[in-house]
Image (cartoon, rainbow, N blue to C red):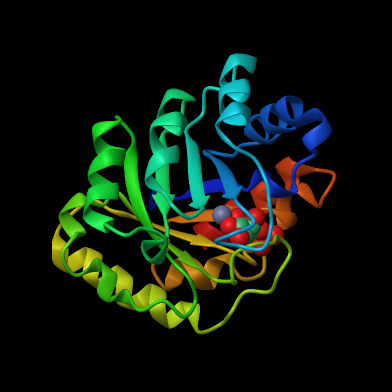
Amino acid sequence: MKDFLIAPSILSADFARLGDDVANVLAAGADVVHFDVMDNHYVPNLTIGPMVCDALRSYGIQAPIDVHLMVKPVDRIVPDFAKAGASIITFHPEASDHVDRTLGLIKDSGCQAGLVFNPATPLHHLDYVMDKLDVILLMSVNPGFGGQSFIPGTLDKLRQVRQRIEQSGRDIRLEIDGGVKVDNIAAIAEAGADMFVAGSAIFGKPDYKAVIDQMRAELAK
Ligand code: DX5
Ligand code: ZN
């Protein structure tokens, strides 16, 4: 079977008992912790920063932490997240003045690097940086909030990006974020994604393992 990663978005976790909630979702079979950073400037919401990432590491969370930066500017927060234990750092190209420089900064800090595309962001931002990418993240909702519905046009965009990854011959993860549920994950995988962020679909249910098992069963079809 293809190697699929399930990355619960802790945006929908219980922030009053975050360490336990993250430990529970990992014990339920999640692969990666998706960590949404919002600044009330690039996106209209405000969430968590490097201190919380550091606190999760101190608490004993060892799984990869996938930091999704929805902030502008990008560069000055990158070293802080690297120090705080981030494994992957992704950012939106329109939030950085120098995309190539930001990617270099992330790699030099020892993390994997990725670009994030909003539903209406064109793919030409990939043109000169494929060799620097470990991850490409497609947003299937407009960023800022959990619990929104998957935008169907993203499936075609996923196919285009999958093709570009194949053409590049590089090992680049194709991550999808927004409105991923048990009932659409198979179609999303079929369109080319291999890393699935899901917030409300997992944390909104009492039994995390049941949801993650159902997602894996859909992916195995
Ligand atoms: C939205 C965030 C997502 C969000 C996904 O801006 O980037 O990670 O938490 O939440 P769901 O899975 O509920 O759409
Ligand atoms: Zn996200």
The vertical placement of 179 against 86, above or below, is below
| Rendered residue at 55%/32% (across/down) | 50
| 115 or 48: nearer the viewer | 48
* Residue 213 point in image, percent of width and height: 65, 47
| 180 or 52: nearer the viewer | 52
**Total tally of numbered discs in the picture:** 0
Picture quadrant of residue 48: top right
| Rendered residue at 74%/64% (across/down) | 147
| Rendered residue at 36%/63% (across/down) | 93
* Residue 4 point in image, percent of width and height: 45, 50
- As drawn, is 59 to the left or to the right of 105? right
The vertical placement of 42 against 38, above or below, is below
* Residue 19 point in image, percent of width and height: 71, 25
Q: Quadrant of ligand 2?
A: bottom right
The vertical placement of 56 against 138, above or below, is above
- As drawn, is 141 to the left or to the right of 66? right
- As drawn, is 146 to the left or to the right of 172? right
| 149 or 196: nearer the viewer | 149
> Would you say residue 214 is visible in this rendering?
yes
> Would you say residue 181 is visible in this rendering?
no
| 99 or 20: nearer the viewer | 99
* Residue 69 point in image, percent of width and height: 49, 50
| Rendered residue at 26%/57% (across/down) | 98
